[in-house]
Amino acid sequence: MSDTPVRPGRPTVRKLPQLPSAVRGLAPAPALRLSRPSDTWFKPALSVVVASAVPHLTLLAIGRLDLIVYTMAGSLCALYGHGLPYARRARAVAGVVLGMAAGLAVSLVTASLTGSTAVLIAVGALLAAVQKVLCDATRIGPPGHVIFTFVSSAALFAPQHLGQIPGHLALTLGAGAFAWLVALAPALVRREGPERRAVARALEAAAACAEDPGPRNRNAADPGPRHHNAADPGPRHRNAAAAAVHAAWQCLLASGRPTPVRRSLERLVVHAEAAFVAPGPGPGAGAADPELLRAWAARTRGRGPVPTPPPAPGTADELYGIDAERAVLRAREGRRAARRALLRRLGPGSPLLPVAVRTLIGCALAGYLCAALGVGRPYWAIVTAASLYQANITLSWNRTLQRTLGNLLGVLVFAAVLPVSRISPLALVCCCLFFGFAAEALITRNYWLGSVAVTPMALLVLEFGGAHPAGELIGDRVLDTVLGAATGFLAATLVTNRRATGRVEQALDVTDRARAAAERTVADPAVAPTERDRARRALTASLVELREAGDTAAGEWWQRALPEQRLLAAERAGHRTLAATAARRGPRAHAPSIGAE
């Protein structure tokens, strides 16, 4: 497939409505509303308990609970990578452990060389900004940079000598290695577990799209005019299905060598893709029976055998193309391309740069303000500010409300449980393990609910080094929370992100080129099916990126006007082209016309 940019004639746009803005004011109710828990909430919850229990109980047995802060840094690495296939998870969690140790090393060396609060706060803010950018660029997923910042900021204000650093880092790396084993242990029981869950999500999203594709996509291959209703769930279902199918393909591509189970999963994704790209009746319609797709999803998610669907048109060619694409990704050139993509996300023109500046300024302001007011633990304010920064300022405002409410309720829980934790060292360890589990069990329902459990756990960690006055801990925590949240959000409003619109424009250009390439494969009967399928997956990926960029920019304040009409037109044309490529599957299929909208 040629990489030469192709700019096809853009579809005629007539009276397209404006996209609804993501900025809904500052109403607290939507930000605090509870949602359904994640379907995998128990995996990080159990992993962090197991990864923490062994080091905690070992240190309890030898009477060195004061070292738990260093082993906990490694144990918390078990929270990462639970959505990744095990082949990629092994590399990702290893990188998390090394990154955690690197941040901790910088903090410990700094703490041993200087006692200046101003220098320590500056280093803490810089580390928080770097950790935020690296986590966003690598897309490591939740819990993101907050755990790194919590560990490195706390270590900055812990008494330290240079001679102690190697031993403390060894404890972190040892606990991190055990966390790595815990994260990969489920592979011994269910090797394709992450792939099965990803494919089940794709089937469920495709079923929702097939059930209600929206009036303007009832016949996706028909290029006639359509009318858009802002309340129509069709575009939302279609975008969600595109993202889920794309994630499933990426999971399968990264899963390693094909196995019989993965072959069945690939066939299921072919059906899910056919259902969402052409959910209505017509020449491009796929296996769009919502009940059948949901039944497949339930069986795929379960512990029984993966369902074996009937072959969809072009399935054999599709799977051959997947094998070829997997081989390219695993080759040296594929790995180089992945590294180049990562460097582009970290480059000077990266849209992540304004968020990094927000993090740096907000964390520094929060730390210095708390230090000026005489708070003994300004790192709490640094962590509070760092936790606020999300993809855009609207989401950052929501996180500000969630963090503040959760921390304030959390100190009340800490006050209630503190007498229990002081019964014995074993009781203190058990309380920390309980709150670690509760935090992961609750945080997927809403961040504030998880913070109710995180706050007492963070306060109880201080008890391992010796008892502290409860009133002092509670007062400092409340003050740090309020000041950190206020200064952190102030920095978010002052540091504008005008690159958000530029990211949308770049995504539009990429989508135009991907759509042109896909249209060429549809129009040319001599094109190999593998080439056509690769072009379709590239177009799907570009549409997912376009929707993500649009949602991010819509929630950003004080920026250039969004090209909303062009974004809507590009999405509509892209999904019509996807439907056309689906209709072209199979050796005797004929491509429908891809007219202008």
Image (tube, rainbow, N blue to C red):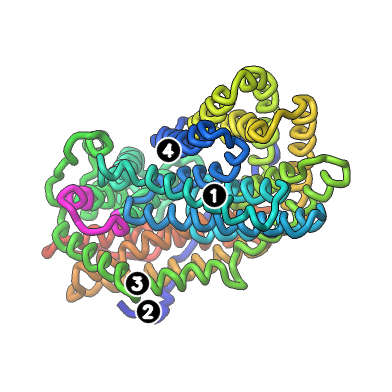
| Residue 408 image position (x, y, % from top left) | 71, 29
Of callouts 2 and 1, which one flags the residue occurring earlier in the amino acid sequence? 2
Where does the N terminus fall, quadrant-wise? Answer: bottom left
For marks 4 and 2, the one nearer the N-term is 2
Q: Which residue is mark 1?
A: 144
- Residues in magenta? 252-266
> Real-space Cα distance between discs 2 and 1?
34 Å
**Lateral position of residue 556 relative to residue 49, left or right:** right
Q: Amino acid at mark 3?
A: Gly
Callout 3 crowding tier (Cα within 10 Å): few <14, some 14–19, many ≥20:
some
Q: What is the chief secondary structure element of the magenta stretch?
A: helix
Q: Residues within 10 Å of mark 1 (few under 14, many from 20)?
A: some
User: What residue sits right under mark 4 in the picture?
Assistant: 47
Task: Give the structural element (helix, strand or loop) at label 3.
Answer: helix
Q: Is residue 436 above or below residue 484?
A: above
User: Closer to the observer: label 4 or label 1?
Assistant: 4
Residue 3: image tag:
2
> What is the spatial separation of the Cα atoms under label 4 and label 2, in whole angstroms?
44 Å
Residue at 48% across, 35% down: 58
Q: Which residue type does callout 1 highlight?
A: Gly
Q: Nearer the viewer, mark 2 or mark 1?
A: 1
* N-term-proximal mark, 1 vs 3: 1
Residue drawn at the location 28% of the way across and 66% of the way down: 534
Is residue 342 in the magenta section?
no
